[in-house]
Image (cartoon, helix red, strand yellow):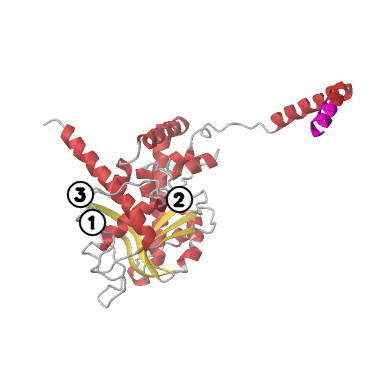
Amino acid sequence: MKMKLLQTICRQLRSSKEFSVESAALVAFSTSSYSCGRKKKVNPYEEVDQEKYSNLVQSVLSSRGVAHTPGSVEEDALLCGPVSKHKPPNQGEDRRVPQNWFPIFNPERSDKPNASDPSVPLKIPLQRNVIPSVTRVLQQTMTKQQVFWLERWKQRMILELGEDGFKEYTSNVFLQGKRFHEALESILSPQETLKERDENLLKSGYIESVQHILKDVSGVRALESAVQHETLNYIGLLDCVAEYQGKLCVIDWKTSEKPKPFIQSTFDNPLQVVAYMGAMNHDTNYSFQVQCGLIVVAYKDGSPAHPHFMDAELCSQYWAKWLLRLEEYTEKKKNQNIQKPE
C-alpha cells in the first residue's frame, strides 16, 4: 500500500506543470544564490594538513593580513619541527618494546623534600657538547612524511614572506618564547634572587592565561635547569620542577593560539616531559626525584591555560615511547657512521 501511494504521488507531481517549472526554477535559483553568497577567498594554506606541521603553522593559518604570531613560541617546538599527533600510549597503537629497558624512576631516591635540599631553586647551566639533546632526538626521529610537510610549510612561508621575512619571523618566535619563560622565571623565583623584575614581561596574554595555574604551584625546586642521563646518554633543559596541587612535577610551559584541551593535542610534548624526568631522576646534581609531569598550554589572548597532568602510570607509558625514539636515533647515527668514508 505504501509503495502504491508513493507511486501515485510521484505521478501527480510529474503531471503538475506548476511544480515542475516554478519549483524547479526556485530550487535552482536558491542553490545558485547560496553558492554565490557563501563563496569566500581561499587561503592558500588551507589545503595543507595543519596537524602534520609544528604548532607555528596553526597560527599562520588563523591570521591574515597582520604580523604572524606563532601558535607555539617555545624553542623546542620550532627546532623539532612538526611532530605527529598521536593517541595516548595506553591505547596500544604501538606495540613495540624497547630493546634496552631502563627505569624512569630511581628506587634509591625519594620524592619527599629533605633538609639538605637547597632553599633556592636549582638552575644548572646546559653544557653544549656532543651528547644529543632531547630536542635533537625528537627532531631526528621524525617520519619522512613529517619532514615533507615541514619543508612544504617552509617553502610556502618563504613564498609569502620572502627569505628575509621568514628569517625575521623565526627570530621573533624565539624572542617571544624567551620573554614568556623569563616572565615565568621572574614570578617563580624568590625575590632575593632577582636583580630586577621587568614588569613589562608580566603583562602579556600568556602570563594572564596561566594565573589560575600559578595559584596551585608551590615549592619550586628547579628553574630552567639542565639534566643529563649518563646511562642513556642524552641531555635536556627543563622549564620547572615544582609542586602542583601538592604533587611534585616536571612542568613544561607551552603556548598556543589554538585550544588544546586534551593531552593528545600536545603532540610530542609528553615525551619531552618524561625524557627530562628520567634524566633528572638519575642525575647526580639532583638529590630528589619526580614521578609526575605537567604540561601547561597558555594562550596569547589570555584565555585560561589548559593543564595536562601526568601521573606516574601515564609517565611510565610515555617513557616507553621515549626509549623507542631514543633507540631509533641511536640506530640512525650508527648507520650514518658506518656509511661515512674512511
Q: Earlier in the sequence, mark 3 or mark 1?
A: 3
Q: Identify the magenta region.
A: 1-10
Amino acid type, residue under disc 3 in the picture: Asn
Front in this rendered view, residue 325 or 210: 325
Residue 245 position, x and y percent, is 44, 70
Q: Residues within 10 Å of mark 3 (few under 14, many from 20)?
A: few
The residue located at (36%, 63%) in the rendering is: 312
Residue, disc 1: 229
Q: How many other residues sit within 10 Å of disc 1, few (<14), some (14-19) or many (≥20)?
A: many
In the image, is 41 to the left or to the right of 68?
Answer: right
Q: Amino acid at mark 2?
A: Gln
Q: Is residue 273 visible?
A: no
Residue 229: in magenta span: no
**What residue is pinned by disc 3?**
129
Q: Is residue 187 visible?
A: yes
The residue wearing badge 2 is 264
Q: CA distance from mark 2 to mark 1?
A: 26 Å
Precedes in sequence: disc 2 or disc 3: 3
197 or 51: nearer the eye? 51
**Percent from the top left, x then y, of residue 101?**
24, 54
Q: Callout 2 environment at 10 Å: few (<14), some (14 to 19), or many (20+)?
A: some
Residue farthest left in this picture: 342
Tag 2 secondary structure? helix
Q: Residue 183's image quarter?
A: bottom left
